Image: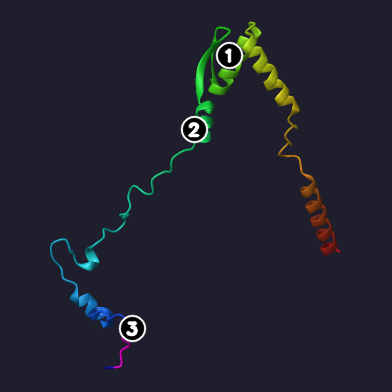
């Protein structure tokens, strides 16, 4: 035995080469340009980038309902979202006496009224008030 462990796989012949020997061994030829000229400066290796992921149903529906369309209302052209147009048509059908639309509209109104009102984003919450009070107390304490 020459001092090598028989349980280990044999070492690669080039594993012990130095960086200099490795760079000298690199052959230039067809499809193998010199190392210093392989990549063009300022040019990405991935020019198109990572592909965008598939959009889920919620995002597609939200984007479609948010699109603006032109409608004529009382003789005037107006741009509103598709969601607004759909709600207007729905309410108009209910107002014209269509029974199914009336039932759905009443259910929609009841669900809307039973939902708690959304908090004003500019209004501080209880947690905000506690934090502000603590900061005010610390500021006054450090000013003394």
Does residue 14 sit above or below 61 in this rendering?
Answer: below
Numbered label attached to residue 7: 3
Q: Residue furthest front?
A: 7
Which circle's residue, 2 or 3, is located before the other in the chain? 3
Crowding at label 3, few (<14), some or many (≥20) Cα neighbours within 10 Å?
Answer: few
Question: Magenta region: which residues?
Answer: 3-7
Marked residue nearer the N-terminal end (1 or 2) = 2
- Where residue 88 appears, x then y in whole percent? 60, 15
Q: CA distance from mark 1 to mark 3?
A: 79 Å
Earlier-in-chain disc, 1 versus 3? 3
Determine the residue positioned at 84% across, 58% down. 137
Residue ID for mark 2:
60
- Front disc: 1 or 3: 3
Query: For mark 2, does the 10 Å Cα neighbourhood hold few (<14), some (14 to 19), or many (20 or more) residues?
Result: few
Disc 1: which residue: 89
Q: Quadrant of the C terminus?
A: bottom right
Secondary-structure class at tag 1:
helix
Q: Position of residue 120 (x, y in %)?
A: 73, 36
Circles 2, 3 touching at the beta carbon (< 8 Å): no
Q: Quadrant of residue 136 in the image?
A: bottom right
């Amino acid at each position: 035995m020459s001092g090598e462990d028989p349980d280990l796989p044999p070492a690669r012949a080039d594993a012990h080469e130095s960086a200099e020997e490795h760079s000298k061994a690199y052959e230039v030829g067809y499809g193998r340009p010199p190392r210093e000229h392989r990549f063009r400066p300022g040019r990405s290796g991935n020019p198109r980038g990572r592909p965008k992921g598939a959009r889920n149903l919620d995002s597609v529906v939200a984007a479609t309902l948010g699109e603006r369309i032109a409608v004529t209302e009382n003789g005037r052209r107006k741009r509103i979202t598709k969601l607004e147009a759909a709600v207007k048509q729905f309410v108009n059908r209910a107002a014209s006496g269509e029974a199914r639309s009336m039932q759905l509209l009443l259910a929609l109104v009841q669900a809307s009224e039973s939902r708690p009102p959304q908090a004003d984003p500019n209004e501080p919450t209880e947690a905000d008030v506690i934090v502000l009070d603590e900061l005010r107390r610390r500021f006054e304490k450090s000013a003394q």
